[in-house]
Amino acid sequence: MHLRLAADREELPKLLSDVQRHAAALLAGLDERDVVPSVPIPPPTPLPGRGVGLKAALDEFTERWEPTLSASAGPRYLGFVTGGVTPAALAGDWLTSTWDQNAFSSLDGAGQHLERETIAWLRGLFGLSDRHHGTFVSGATMSTTVGLATAREWLGERRGVSPAEDGVGGLGPVRVLSGAAHSSVSKALSILGVGRAALVPVDTLPGREAVDIAALERALREHEADGPCVVVANAGTVNTADFDDLRAIRALRERHDFWLHVDAAFGAFAALSADSSHLVDGLDAADSVCVDLHKWLNVPYDSAVQFTRRRDLQTAVFQNAAAYLGPLGETPDTAHLTPENSHRLRAVAAWFTLRAYGRDGHREIVERCVACARALGDTIDGTPGLRLLAPVHLNVVCFTLAENPTAERLAALTGRLADVVFLTPTVLDGVPALRAAFSNWRTSDVDTRRIITALQEALHEL
Ligand SMILES: *Cc1c(COP(=O)(O)O)cnc(C)c1O
């Protein structure tokens, strides 16, 4: 064995407790760290021929790279939709790497059973019945790709062909109708050989990102001659956290034949609170559902779940026929369910946080994030220099400058705020804007007040 490797193995308990102390110190400083650091990125260095051992590697990482990393795990990183890591999720993630299971086959150990238990807990959390089967994937984009791949096979079933067997050539026209679809839908359609042009945007309600149900029905009727469509409903849009009316979409199925995929990447968590659960009423009617866990469940990247009611079609697409993997059977191994083959036992972090804090603990996180978003939204609404662009439906605040809201002026504003809060730019209805998305378990009203103060100061200096 290499000398350094042998020495690290010898010293492993001590080295691990050094790393643990280092991590604890980082977490203790997270709230006060600049949210986006303004230090230069170190130039890349070539890989040295000689290894230095874990201790020296940790020292080098601490010195060269750590100062450049954002505090995205912290309470005032409100860009994109970004969760942190609960203590139990962190412990679960450490143990995932410690056990280093390949949870893709049932030939060894019970990793997949742990995953299935966790999926059942998640199903309960989101109000899905056991007719929805679920699998862990790396993110919502991958989850939507699996959902739409299954939808593609369903279209084939309706038309007497199998895209999984024979390719998409014989499938005929594919129409994917959606109001304010996330960009990952186009990406998935590109990956699936259906093409980005298959996405047909449907009008949203005036001043909203929620789909206009009458327009959706018109679009369904218009494309009926081409055969059934796919509808992607949005439960939580990234700009304004708006929700399509899922019950009304469910009702359309009485008159129209379509596959319903719901992008509930973060919106599914509305189900946890009595104040917001109405937003996802009807979610169970979906044929496939996408939910991110690395957002509002506050587990580390990369973790999401995909649910579908048609596992037979899912395995038609993703089965990985290999003599060494064994047959599909009643309960297919994960190797037959997603684009992945080898499969990190991602479920452990979710299992830990769900077991440690339960439904009540995770409800409290959701409700606190929503309260923070409302407080920020109310302040922005009452600040003359700012303009709230949409009501705060859930955990996202979308706003802009009241006067001359150019992308440049907004960038100047966020630049001044970078040490206190990270916001991401967007464009809503042609208007350059900013969004603040609350989904970190650490964020409190103290943080919201700090953000408000910083925002008002920055506005003053603009
Ligand atoms: C974040 C997000 C996605 C994409 O998620 P990834 O985990 O980054 O792949 C898709 N849809 C919605 C609504 C999202 O918020």
Image (spheres, rainbow, N blue to C red):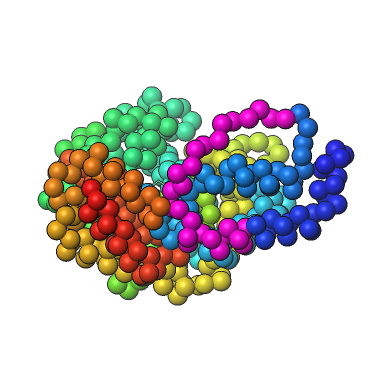
The residue sitting at 21% across, 60% down in the picture is: 380
| Residue at 56% over, 70% down | 355
Number of residue marks: 0
Looking at the picture, tell me which residue is in the foreground, 398 or 330. Answer: 398
Let me know if residue 231 appears in the view: no
Q: Quadrant of residue 235?
A: bottom left
Q: Viewed as shown, does residue 459 lie left or right of 102? A: left
The front one of 43 and 249 is: 43
Residue 35: in sight, yes or no?
yes
Front in this rendered view, residue 243 or 415? 415
Q: Quadrant of residue 351?
A: bottom right
Magenta run includes residue 25 = yes
Residue 283's x, y, as percent? 33, 59
Magenta span of residues = 23-48
Name the spot of residue 153 as percent of width and height, x first.
41, 38
Residue at the far top: name it. Answer: 169
Residue at 17% across, 61% down: 383
State whether the magenta stretch is mostly helix, strand or loop.
loop
Q: Is residue 385 above or below residue 191?
A: below
Give how far across and how far down residue 190 sits, in percent.
38, 31
Residue at the farthest front position: 461
Residue 87 percent location from the top left of the image: 56, 65
Q: Residue 85: within the magenta? A: no
Viewport quadrant of the N terminus: top right
The one nearer the camera, 286 or 354, is 354
Residue visible at 45% across and 53% down? 34
Quarter of the image for residue 48 reads top right
Left or right relative to 342: residue 313? left
237 lies left or right of 320: left
